[in-house]
Amino acid sequence: MPRNRGTTSLKCKRRTANPMREYDHLPAELRTWLSQAVLPWRAGSVKRSFEKALAKTGDPARALHELDELQARLVAKDAAKVWGTSYPLSLR
């Protein structure tokens, strides 16, 4: 049966915990970021990535910016695998 995630080359994992409970336990800034995310992040994944970025930058706003950059890299990687390396078409 087809799933709701569409065509993607990104890894998929089975859930072992309650995803809504994990989401509810995230800090408010992460819930806000996650509500606007392009990719279907799991709460645990985004929390680990945020904590790593926060340890690196020491600033929550800069850590969220790091998450934006990480997400952009993942989308670019996935787009090349799904649509080919010529996507998006460059305008000349």
Image (cartoon, helix red, strand yellow):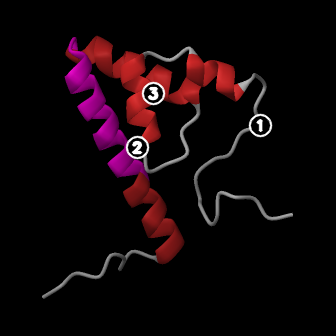
Q: Which residue is mark 2?
A: 36
Residue 85 lies in the magenta stretch = no
Mark positioned earlier in the residue sequence (1 or 3): 1
Amino acid at the residue labelled 3: Arg
Q: Which residue is mark 3?
A: 31
Mark pair 1, 3: CA separation: 21 Å
Would you place residue 60 above or below residue 68 in this image?
Answer: above
| Residue at 38% over, 34% down | 33
Residue at the right extreme of this rendering: 1
Mark positioned earlier in the residue sequence (2 or 3): 3
Q: Marks 2 and 1: CB-CB under 8 Å? A: no
Question: Is 80 in front, or is 22?
Answer: 22
Mark 2: few/some/many CA within 10 Å (<14, 14-19, 20+)? few
Residue at the left extreme of this rendering: 92
- How far across and how far down the image is residue 66, in percent? 28, 32
Q: Which residue is mark 1?
A: 14
Residue at the bottom extreme of this rendering: 92
Part of the protein shown in magenta: 58-74
Amino acid at the residue labelled 2: Gln
Mark pair 2, 1: CA separation: 23 Å
Mark 1: few/some/many CA within 10 Å (<14, 14-19, 20+)? few
Mark pair 2, 3: CA separation: 9 Å
Amino acid at the residue labelled 1: Arg
Would you place residue 18 above or below residue 38 in this image?
Answer: above
| Residue at 75% over, 32% down | 15
Instruction: Tell me if 6 is positioned left or right of 69 in this view.
Output: right
Mark 3: few/some/many CA within 10 Å (<14, 14-19, 20+)? some
Figure quadrant of the N terminus: bottom right
Q: Marks 2 and 3: CB-CB under 8 Å? A: no
Figure quadrant of the C terminus: bottom left
- How far across and how far down the image is residue 78, in percent? 48, 60
Task: Determine the secondary structure under disc 1.
Answer: loop
